[in-house]
Image (cartoon, rainbow, N blue to C red):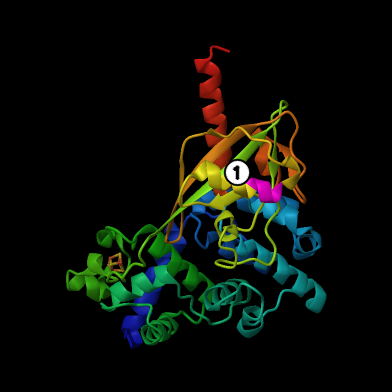
């Protein structure tokens, strides 16, 4: 562990580098806890460049906590649509409502109080409390852990509870108590720009002289790989209705269902958002989808729907590799299915939908266009 003068030099060198070379990011120009919180939640699982337009649109529509708390969930989800991991925004919305109901819209100021909000763990509470309120809490996520593992040549699985606790203690010991918010951002900047997962740029690193992993020549090998969860293959079939005006049907987010609760249905894979009628299959996809549609749409009786295969879509959600077989179903009039919404097929995003649903819509479009061209229409 770095101590005394060595620690002071380490802190000074990292902070000086950060002050000189940091990227100009929108959320670094503010001390508003709401804006910092939003950026931290968006940046979980999302790259900076991808998050920026969402961040701007979200703040334009919800400039403060009150506006977010008062909005209907469907609208909040729609503005998040495409970013994925929708539990993040559901919790954000719930937390905003809690802050307005319990604190008159005043954001809690201590690490402990921030931690009580839905969807906020140690990392986010440390980031908000240090950056907005100057609290002395060091951030620790997988990226900061990678930097610490290299700096201190820590081997083995970093995610065991004991190792993680030790890394948190190391992060706390490194924290510059005079500028905790800036320090945390400097660590994040280092992990994002130089001490990256592959090929860390040690020659440019402002703290390379303190790095044990580099001295031992093992920096690139750290952190050591964890055992990966085996990939599970899932096959789904989706029904994309289209009437003569190009309108389609989307089903509402399934309520009160979770993974495994319905053998025939896969709400978790459509991120509990609006979606095309979808079913998991392990045989003839068209037959299984037909049977599923008959359950959803008993009024159709024995009328045979004409299902046209529209290629194959691939999608990955954590450890699942999903293959989706979309079917285009041209109908004169869209069927009446309880709770379903009618939307133009080329605008499925007017409702909050997942990337999987977008890909299915695109595949059907592409197949329909190819079909039209081959017929010379
Ligand atoms: Fe990371 Fe290299 Fe800097 Fe060590 S010297 S902290 S491995 S970038």
Name the quadrant of the N terminus.
bottom left
Residue behind mark 1: 290
Against 142, residue 278 (above or below) is above
- The crowding category of the residue bearing disc 1, from other C-alpha atoms within 10 Å (few below 14, some 14 to 19, many at least 20), is some
Q: Residue furthest front?
A: 302
- Judged left or right of residue 14, residue 334 is right
Look at 60% across and 76% down and name the residue there: 129
Q: Residue furthest left?
A: 216
Visible residue check, residue 15: no
Instruction: Please state the horizontal and vertical placement of residue 351, each as a whole percent of the image.
Output: 70, 46
Between 210 and 360, the one lying in front of the other is 360
Q: Quadrant of ligand 1?
A: bottom left
Instruction: Please state the horizontal and vertical placement of residue 314, each as a whole percent of the image.
Output: 45, 45
Q: Residue furthest top?
A: 376
Instruction: Please state the horizontal and vertical placement of residue 255, each as a whole percent of the image.
Output: 70, 63
Stretch in magenta: 293-297
- Judged left or right of residue 208, residue 309 is right
Where residue 271 sits, quadrant-wise, is bottom right
Any magenta on residue 32?
Answer: no
Between 80 and 107, the one lying in front of the other is 80
Name the quadrant of the C terminus.
top right
Any magenta on residue 295?
Answer: yes
- Judged left or right of residue 150, residue 323 is right
Between 330 and 13, the one lying in front of the other is 330
**Majority SS type along the magenta span:** helix
Q: Secondary structure at mark 1?
A: helix
């Amino acid at each position: 562990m770095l101590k005394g003068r060595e620690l002071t030099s380490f802190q000074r060198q990292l902070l000086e580098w950060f002050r000189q070379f940091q990227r100009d990011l929108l959320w670094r120009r503010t001390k508003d806890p709401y804006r910092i919180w939003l950026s931290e939640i968006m940046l979980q699982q999302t790259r900076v460049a991808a998050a920026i337009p969402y961040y701007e649109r979200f703040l334009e529509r919800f400039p403060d906590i009150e506006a977010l708390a008062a909005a209907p969930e469907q609208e909040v989800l729609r503005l998040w649509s495409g970013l994925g991991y929708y539990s993040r925004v559901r919790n954000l919305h719930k937390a905003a409502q809690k802050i307005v109901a319990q604190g008159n819209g005043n954001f809690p100021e201590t690490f402990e109080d921030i931690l009580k909000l839905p969807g906020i763990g140690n990392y986010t509470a440390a980031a908000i409390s240090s950056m907005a309120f100057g609290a002395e809490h060091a951030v620790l996520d997988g990226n900061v852990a990678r930097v610490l593992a290299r700096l201190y040549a820590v081997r083995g699985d970093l995610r065991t509870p004991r190792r993680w606790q030790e890394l948190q203690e190391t992060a706390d010991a490194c924290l510059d108590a005079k500028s905790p918010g800036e320090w945390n951002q400097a660590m994040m900047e280092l992990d994002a720009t130089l001490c990256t997962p592959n090929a860390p740029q040690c020659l440019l690193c402002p703290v390379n002289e303190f790095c044990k992993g580099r001295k031992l020549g093992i920096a690139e090998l750290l952190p050591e790989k964890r055992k990966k969860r085996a990939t599970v293959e899932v096959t789904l079939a989706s029904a994309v209705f289209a009437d003569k005006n190009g309108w389609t049907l989307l089903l509402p987010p399934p309520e009160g269902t979770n993974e495994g609760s319905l053998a025939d249905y896969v709400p978790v894979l459509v991120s509990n958002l609006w979606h095309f009628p979808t079913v998991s299959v392990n045989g003839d996809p068209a037959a299984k989808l037909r049977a599923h549609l008959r359950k959803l749409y008993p009024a159709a009786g024995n009328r045979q729907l004409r299902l046209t295969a529209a290629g194959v879509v691939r999608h990955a959600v954590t450890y699942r590799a999903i293959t989706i077989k979309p079917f285009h179903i041209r109908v004169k009039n869209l069927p009446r299915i309880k709770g379903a919404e009618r939307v133009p097929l080329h605008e499925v995003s007017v409702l909050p939908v997942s990337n999987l649903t977008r890909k299915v819509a695109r595949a059907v479009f592409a197949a329909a266009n190819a079909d039209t061209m081959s017929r010379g229409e």
